[in-house]
Image (spheres, helix red, strand yellow):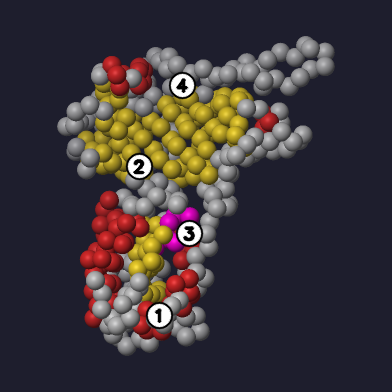
């Protein structure tokens, strides 16, 4: 294993202390001493048939948070975003964590991780000089090399801040500990190259800056999905044989196709949905393809043999998920005539795609694929 160890470093980090001292009627209160934010921990990456370790222990980091400005006496303030950055000597091996507000109950979620295997010297592209991460594998690309996470499942727990900091336009939050919890390994990619990495050991402790914003939104607004729960009949799906609904995919791009197992064009549509799921998984896109089979079922195996992992929900008369999906678009067709229709949802639950059925079971498969592609590549939150 090649190890990249922190050298004596003086990575610049300035902490503003303005307005952070509780007032003393006698005027004798002294400003608390600044505590540099420092990192602990490392990560190892297997790439190019080698294992490389980058150790940030002892490195000085920067952290800038945003809090919702709250000047109410005694009022608390939530934190809707954060940016943490740490690097070795001269800025090499820079690692960045970017967080944003999640949906209700999620807190701060990790949006992106960036690893600069080769970065611009002092961060200035105009100098046209780069600095390599010492000991890192030789990168075939020229210029800057930044590996970015594709799909991250991590969260930073940060309690609301109190007064007087909650009411300040710029506040120093003293001696905070920042630790991200991860649900799984993080996949880092750059131009087709990738590695999986465990970042859970990297933590930070010290003073952080928070900027006040009275318009900051601390919780994402979620647009409710159509409400239904059905049994997942695909043996290869993670939810096989369980009964659940669209809420299980909250925070992902979601595309739903209504199909009938007795309909030839529906079989082709189902096969395409699995093909697209495989494509998006390989590309690291946080998207989920879903099929709902007509309650007028004939032979469900005609669908299940066309897929490997995507959920196939079996509609039933008592639920009628088809009608719930199509309710905002009810019009010319109803019942089984709405087969081959498609519905796409952004990560915040807003509907961003409606593929209108023909009413006679015919399907322009190319047009449907283009509609799905547009939905998956649309902004996460319209």
Front position in the image: 49 or 333: 333
Q: Residue at x 48, y 74 (%)?
A: 327
The answer for how far apart the CA atoms under marks 3 and 2 are is: 23 Å
- Any part of residue 109 in sight: yes
The residue mark sitting in front, 3 or 4, is 3
Label 2: which secondary element = strand
Front position in the image: 54 or 110: 110
Disc 1 packing (10 Å; few <14; some 14–19; many ≥20): few
Instruction: Answer with left or right where residue 137 lies relative to residue 332.
Output: left
Q: Which residue is mark 2?
A: 149
Q: Looking at the picture, how far across and down is residue 75, in whole percent? A: 73, 37
The residue mark sitting in front, 1 or 3, is 1
Residue furthest top in the image? 28
Residue furthest left in the image? 140
The answer for how far apart the CA atoms under marks 1 and 2 are is: 44 Å
Tell which circle, 4 or 1, labels the residue nearer the N-terminal end. Answer: 4
Q: Residue at x 58, y 43 (%)?
A: 217
Mark 1 and mark 3 residues within 8 Å of each other at the beta carbon: no
- In the image, the segment drawn in magenta is 344-351
In reply to whether residue 176 is colored magenta, the answer given is no
Q: Which residue is mark 1?
A: 332
Tell which circle, 3 or 2, labels the residue nearer the N-terminal end. Answer: 2
The answer for how far apart the CA atoms under marks 1 and 3 are is: 26 Å
Which numbered dot is residue 60? Answer: 4
- Any part of residue 259 in sight: no
Tell which circle, 2 or 4, labels the residue nearer the N-terminal end. Answer: 4
Disc 2 packing (10 Å; few <14; some 14–19; many ≥20): many
Mark 1 and mark 2 residues within 8 Å of each other at the beta carbon: no
């Amino acid at each position: 294993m090649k190890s990249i160890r922190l050298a004596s470093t003086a990575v610049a980090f300035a902490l503003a202390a303005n307005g952070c001292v509780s007032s003393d009627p006698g005027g004798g209160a002294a400003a608390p001493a600044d505590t540099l934010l420092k990192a602990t921990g490392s990560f190892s990456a297997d790439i190019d048939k080698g294992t490389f370790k980058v150790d940030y222990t002892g490195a000085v980091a920067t952290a800038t948070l945003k809090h919702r400005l709250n000047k109410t006496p005694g009022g608390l303030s939530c934190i809707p975003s954060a940016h943490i950055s740490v690097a070795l000597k001269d800025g090499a091996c820079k690692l960045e964590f970017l967080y944003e507000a999640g949906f209700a109950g999620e807190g701060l979620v990790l949006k992106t991780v960036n690893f600069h295997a080769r970065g611009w010297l002092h961060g200035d592209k105009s100098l046209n000089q780069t600095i390599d991460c010492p000991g890192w594998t030789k990168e075939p690309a020229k210029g800057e090399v930044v590996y970015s996470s594709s799909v991250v499942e991590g969260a930073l727990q940060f309690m609301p801040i109190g007064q007087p900091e909650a009411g300040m336009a710029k506040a120093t939050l003293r001696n905070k500990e920042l630790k991200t919890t991860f649900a799984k390994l993080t996949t880092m990619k750059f131009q087709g190259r990738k590695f999986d990495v465990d970042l859970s050991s990297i933590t930070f402790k010290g003073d952080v800056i928070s900027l006040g914003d009275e318009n900051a939104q601390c919780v994402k607004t979620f647009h409710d999905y159509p409400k239904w729960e059905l049994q997942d009949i695909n043996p290869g799906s993670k939810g096989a044989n369980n009964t659940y609904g669209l809420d299980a995919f909250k925070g992902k791009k979601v595309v739903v196709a209504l199909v009938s197992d007795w309909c030839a064009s529906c079989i082709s549509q189902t096969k395409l949905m699995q093909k697209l799921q495989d494509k998006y998984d390989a590309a690291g896109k946080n998207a989920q393809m879903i099929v709902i089979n007509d309650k007028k079922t004939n032979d469900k195996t005609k669908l299940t043999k066309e897929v490997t992992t995507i959920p196939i929900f079996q509609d039933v008369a008592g639920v009628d998920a088809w009608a719930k999906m199509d309710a905002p678009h009810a019009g010319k067709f109803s019942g089984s005539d709405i087969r081959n229709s498609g519905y796409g949802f952004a990560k915040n639950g807003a509907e961003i795609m409606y593929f209108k059925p023909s009413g006679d079971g015919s399907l322009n498969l190319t047009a449907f694929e283009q509609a799905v592609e547009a939905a998956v590549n649309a902004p996460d939150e319209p």
